[in-house]
Image (cartoon, rainbow, N blue to C red):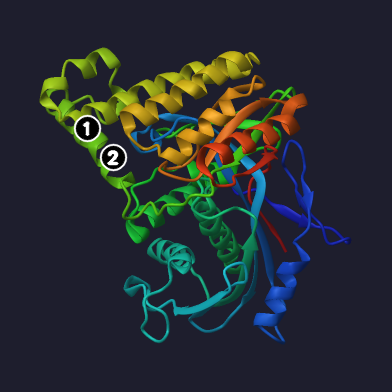
Amino acid sequence: MGFWLTLITKTGTFIKTNATNPVTTTPPRSLLSAFKNAYPGLSPDVFVRAPGRVNLLGGHVDNHEGAVINIAINREIWLAAAYGTSELVQLHAPDLGYSAMFSLKNLNERKDVVGDDLPRWALYPAGMAWALQRRGLRISGISAAFLGNVPMRAGLSSSAAVEEIFAIAWQALGNWRLDSGDLAVLGTEVEREYIGVGSGIQDQFTCLHARKNHALWLDCRTLDYRHTPLPSTAKIVICDTNTRRELAGSGYTSRAQDGHAAAHTIRLVDPQVRTLRDVFLERLAEFEALLTPDQFRRARHVVTEIARVEQGIDTLERGDLVTFGRLMNESYWSARDDYGSSSPALDAMWEAATHHESCYGARYSGGGEAGVIVALVEAAAVEDFIACTAARYDQATGRPGDLYAVEPAESAGVFL
């Protein structure tokens, strides 16, 4: 799938020209103000928008080449960037209250221009510059400001959105074109090789291929995908526990390694097994004695979750929200009990959400341990669901949650 072209209109709006449902939007005024304050005398040469995403089904299966069901959400990151002739990349993140500067000549060092370690948030644009250069693509220094309303480290893929807005900006400024699937692969390389998180491709791919009012089914091995309308009788509600974790240094990578180790053990006997995608539950049971308890449980979650996605896309296409919600609940139980990546806060929010009679089902989105629960709710009952779930969560934990409905949004694009 090629990069989607854009047009600028005389009114200053952004239109994706070959989208099935064209989306019109404008950069937030606060972005231009932040840019002008950070870089007096400069004007942006490009604006880019990228959405966050939630995973409806398919947790922890993308790095085992399974399929997933996601939506992009109408929470987004915006970037304004001016072309530079030097090798310097200047970054300003007004939401964080920080700025950083690094050179394109020493990206392997992960240092800023004075030799200090780059802050975590700056590693994502630096990593994308590193990945693009490794592909032999021409990129320049830039002066950039970026902001948005995708909460960081919540499981809504803010990092993928940041990676892809910078990839798209450098593409527009450099006047070269990569297939949007390739751009997604580059984002995955940034996560795995530059940041050090063993994640898969679903976040970046969804960011670049989502469609408004649709869910995206993605085969993470072949990168085949299709869009399925999300029934208007249901809404997606984000239930933020207001707890956070870092994937790098957490149990996320070790759990993924347990799954890969299980696949490796099976592959020694059956060379046709490349990943856990190639293993059925009955076959996995034959190897239980050869695996550690953690390896077996992690693998069992992945294998059963892949099967849930296969069933889930069929039920979603039929509009069977009751069955799809049940699969979301089963996904949560499996991630909690087998994959071991829940937390007391996530458990409390899941209990609060599914206690409401209008909730079809719920599960966490992202790497687990903290962040958000994503709930599928009857559209007519969203306000009552939010009020009741927030109250139950606060009562159970003594911590306020942040709950809000989201809409399936369009994929990332550029405003020139």
Q: Is residue 291 above or below residue 147?
A: above
Q: Is residue 229 above or below residue 49?
A: above
Q: Residue at x 78, y 53 (%)?
A: 25
What whole-number distance in Å separates the C-alpha atoms at marks 1 and 2? 8 Å
Residue with the mark numbered 1: 294
Residue with the mark numbered 2: 255
Report the side of 374 relative to 232 (left or right). Answer: left
Mark 1 or 2 closer to N-term? 2
Any mark on residue 380, and which? none
Helix, strand or loop at mark 2: helix
Image quadrant where one finds the N terminus:
top right
Q: Pick whichever, 373 or 84, lies toward us.
A: 373
Amino acid type, mark 1: Asp
Helix, strand or loop at mark 1: helix
Pointer 1 with pointer 2, Cβ within 8 A: yes
Amino acid type, mark 2: Arg
Q: Pick whichever, 330 or 38, lies toward us.
A: 330
Residue 325 x/y as whole percent? 56, 20
Q: Pick whichever, 372 or 176, lies toward us.
A: 372
Residue 209 x/y as whole percent? 59, 41
Residue 114 x/y as whole percent? 40, 87
Q: Is residue 242 above or below residue 226?
A: below
Q: Is residue 243 visible?
A: yes
Q: In the image as oriented, which residue stretches furthest toward the right?
A: 11
Image quadrant where one finds the C terminus:
bottom right
Residue 103 x/y as whole percent? 44, 80
Q: Pick whichever, 414 or 101, lies toward us.
A: 101
Q: Check disc 1: other Cα within 10 Å, few if <14, some if 14-19, many if 20+.
A: some
